Image: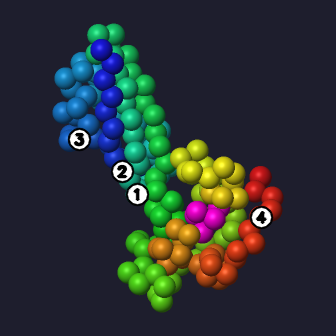
Amino acid sequence: MVQKIEVLVEGGKASGGPPLGPAIGPMGLNINEVVAKINEATADFSGMKVPVTITADPSTRKYEIKVGTPPASSLLIKAADVQKGSGDSLRVKIGDVSMDQVRDIARLKFDSTLSKDLDGTVREVMGTAVSVGVTVDGKDPRELKNIKGNHS
């Protein structure tokens, strides 16, 4: 019977301890091998929590690892090169990102959003930027309403 485990791990720093080890061990999988593959797959998200889904068949000991993307807020905070979002995002701005960085984040998040097109996902990321206190190209993201254009 196929089993599924969903966990949040720090990018590139998963370990055989909780929550992974106790969940993987009873399945008969090689914990070190699974952890190594997760760390390899999440290395680009160092310092961020990354959703990981492990689907395994204990009878054959075959498994598949699916790595999601961190929340848009975490990606914006990393892009702005700051430690955390603003506690008062409407008055206190904690950093700035470029429109290109917003588009890159939108491309990463597109499959996990409700938007029908990339422009919609860009608007979602811009809304998140407002929430965490990040400006876009030095401006309040709410001022950049007309964001349609080439997102390739």
**Total labels drawn:** 4
**Distance from the alpha carbon under mark 1 to that under mark 2:** 6 Å
Depth-wise, is mark 3 or mark 1 nearer the camera?
A: 3
**Distance from the alpha carbon under mark 4 to that under mark 1:** 31 Å
**Distance from the alpha carbon under mark 3 to that under mark 4:** 42 Å
Residue found 47% across the figure and 74% down from its top? 132
Q: What element carries label 3?
A: loop
Residue on which disc 4 sits: 148
Depth-wise, is mark 4 or mark 2 nearer the camera?
A: 4
Residue found at the far right of this picture: 150
Depth-wise, is mark 3 or mark 4 nearer the camera?
A: 4
Say which label, 4 or 1, has the lower sequence index: 1
Depth-wise, is mark 4 or mark 1 nearer the camera?
A: 4
Residue on which disc 3 sits: 19
Tag 3: amino acid: Pro
Residue found at the far top of this picture: 60
Disc marking residue 10: 2
Which is nearer the eye, 136 or 47?
136
**Distance from the alpha carbon under mark 3 to that under mark 2:** 12 Å
Q: Position of residue 74 (x, y in %)?
A: 46, 62
Q: Badge 2, how many Cα within 10 Å: few under 14, some, many 20+?
A: some
Tag 1: amino acid: Gly
Q: Is residue 37 visible?
A: no
Q: Is mark 1 on a helix, strand or loop?
A: loop
Residue 65's place in the image compared with 93, above or below, is above
Disc marking residue 47: 1
The stretch drawn in magenta includes residue 124: yes
Left or right: 14 in relation to 104: left
Say which label, 3 or 2, has the lower sequence index: 2
